[in-house]
Amino acid sequence: MSERVFVGMTPGDDTPVSCIVVDAAGAPRSRASDMPLQDIAALAGERPVEVVLHSMSVVRTQCMLPVSGSKLAQAMPYALEEQFAEDVDTLHFAASGADDDGTRLVAAIARSELEACLQRLSDADIVPRAVYSSHDALTPLTGFSQLLAVDDSIIVQGNDGTLAGFQGVSPLSIMEAWRASADATEDDEESGSDNVRIYADPSAHAAHSDDWARITQDFANADIRLLDDGWLAFAARALVNRDAINFLQGNYAASSNTLAVFKPWYLAAGLLGAALLLGLVTRFIDYRDLANQSAQLDQDIANYVGRVTGSKPTLSAAEQQLRALLGSRRGGSATSGGNTTSSRPFLETLRVVAEAVDADDSNTVDAFNYRNDVLDIRLTTSNAAALEALTKSIGEAGQLRAQIQRTEQLDDSVKSFVQVRPAAE
């Protein structure tokens, strides 16, 4: 997604935070405004959230360690502990990628500060993709020192890229001390310490108007720029276009960001899952019904075959007889002559004939053959009248007609050949 939501937070400050939406180039889609975090969660929607912590307790330094990943996170505190007065176990260290010579920029922040901010975000149901320091709003500018003034806090970046933050100190005092330090360590006469660019939000610009006037007078090349749209919009433009240090490393790595990205799809995924479950249940019910119908059909087949043949075959035997009658759909059998039809007309014909044969206990079926919707039956009946009644019973339903092909009179019975075919033929 091209748009991002930037949130500006001050550690230890529970007041509404700043928020701005920017496009892929960092251009604002809206003005930065203060609002509760809960409202920001609704505003963000599917857009990723990136947080900028404005804290003067953040310490910037650098290190050169020949390791990466989890080993780097474990090694940094002990490699840099001499630079910190506090216990490094209370600090969280995050590093940039390594330069060509292996040097990495490092940002350190009190764990308590970072965790408090992350907890506030979590309480508002916000999982940030990244957490930066406002120090990274100042991108290196060759030959210039830079200053970012927000309310009563000031971040200074020397022309060598060194960063430091100050709280409650006047801009003029900071700049004079910075220039003195740069001049003392510079071999050349032209140290470039008079080249300074200052960014001030409206509050800091109004509060230190006298200092800005003195800085403009005392520094040969001082450029003071008012941030009319606030410090967060300025930081967002810079952070979108550079590889800044993300505090979400080590134990704070944003492993749950994937869930945050897909969170707007939770409802759709739930509905899809419910639809799939309903589909499976429906399929199961259909399968059960078909299984019951199949079992009933098997039983009907056995019953009809038994009633016609006068025997009681098992289901498997009845199936074999049907296969012999119907043949294979890929070439038929000797009995069917290769001509096959649907089993439905056959079963219906077999049912009607079976009921007609059952009407007289003396009737027996000696043999039958089914082909092209025509059933040929060799019958034995007690007399000619019984044969006539049987053929009449077959035709009474109106769907079939039975024709006596020939008969043979025996001493106590009549042998006959009867052909049953659809009445429409």
Image (cartoon, helix red, strand yellow):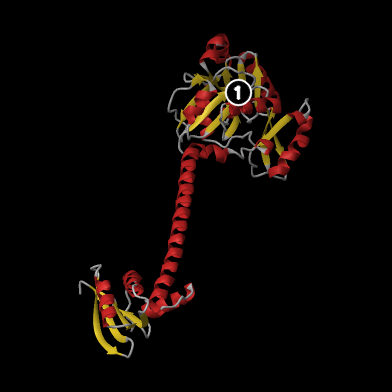
* Along the viewing direction, whichever of 417 and 206 lies nearer the viewer: 417
Image point 78% across, 28% down: which residue?
87
Residue 196 screen position, x and y as percent: 57, 22
Location of residue 370 with respect to 242 vertically, above or below: below
Q: Is residue 228 above or below residue 383?
A: above
Position in image of residue 420 (x %, y %): 27, 77
Q: Look at 63% across and 31% down and name the residue there.
A: 161
Residue where numbered disc 1 is placed: 54
Query: Can residue 390 be seen by looking at this rendering?
Result: yes
Residue 141 is at least partly visible in this image: no
Secondary structure of the residue carrying tag 1 is: loop
Please state the horizontal and vertical placement of residue 357, each as a whole percent of the image. Answer: 34, 75
Residue 48, placed above or below residue 327: above
Q: Position of residue 394 (x, y in %)?
A: 27, 73
Which residue reaches farthest front? 412
Residue situated in front as seen by the camera: 259 or 412: 412
Q: Quadrant of the C terminus?
A: bottom left
The mark tally for this picture is 1
In this rendering, position of residue 162 left or right of residue 18: right
Tell me the crowding category of disc 1: few under 14, some 14 to 19, or many 20 or more residues within 10 angstroms, Cα based. many
For the point 30% across and 86% down, the residue is 414
Query: Is 96 located above or below residue 339 in the figure?
Result: above
Of 375 and 277, which appears nearest the observer?
375
Of residues 333 and 357, the one nearer the viewer is 357
Question: What amino acid is found at the position of numbered circle 1 in the picture?
Answer: His
